[in-house]
Amino acid sequence: MSNTRETILENLFGELNNQMFERRLSMVSVEFSERMTSAAGRYFPQRKLIRLSAPYLRLHGWDKCRNTLIHEMIHADLHVRRKPYGHTPEFKHWLKKLTGEKSIYHHDDMRPYDRPYRHVYTCPRGHKYYRKNRTRRKTSCGQCDKTYNPRYLLKYIGRENV
């Protein structure tokens, strides 16, 4: 079944690339991930890769997955055209135009996959951060300094039940 799912995704990507993006995304690849449970999709600019959540597809079907794919394709298109590719006003303009959606967030859509716990971090000044996933790289406190600063490295405290 996964081969069929992957083929459908690649065909859908090709159609959308032709119809909406004037074939600018031919160097971008798409794939599903079984491990993605906190986001419906994500664009990786360095790899020119769009990854969609397979659990999201099972929960919500191809219609919502199609809109998620378009969302990620907008990120990729802006990146390919050397424009800011975050959730900028231009991104939101294209999202509304191409999908009719106004919001970039769909937290409730992934709620069935919420963890019963969260990971807690603290900085040297005592600010606390709560995350779904453990960070695998050094991260500093954004309240103490807006850019990475090793003086304010976050320290892992442990898991806490929600």
Image (cartoon, grey):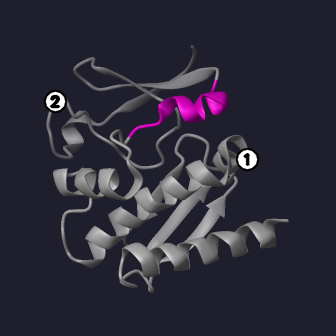
Q: Residue furthest right?
A: 1
When asked about the image quadrant of residue 155, the answer is top left
Using the rendered image of the protein, determine whether residue 47 is visible from the camera's viewpoint.
Answer: no
- Name the residue that disc number 1 marks: 58
Q: Is residue 158 left or right of residue 53?
A: left
Q: Which residue is mark 2?
A: 144
- Indicate the position of residue 67 as horizontal and vertical percent values: 49, 54
Is 32 left, or right, of 130 in this rendering? right
Q: Amino acid at mark 2?
A: Cys
| Between 126 and 53, the one nearer to me in the picture | 53
* Secondary structure state at the residue bearing disc 2: loop
Region in magenta: 105-115
Percent position of residue 46, x then y: 38, 73
Sequence order check, earlier mark of 2 and 1: 1
Asked if the magenta segment contains residue 12, the reply would be: no
- Magenta portion: prevailing SS class: helix
Asked if residue 89 is positioned above or below residue 83 in the image, the reply reads above
Q: Quadrant of the C terminus?
A: top right
Q: Hey, what amino acid is under mark 1?
A: Arg
- Tell me the crowding category of disc 2: few under 14, some 14 to 19, or many 20 or more residues within 10 angstroms, Cα based: some
Q: Can you tell which mark lies on residue 88?
A: none
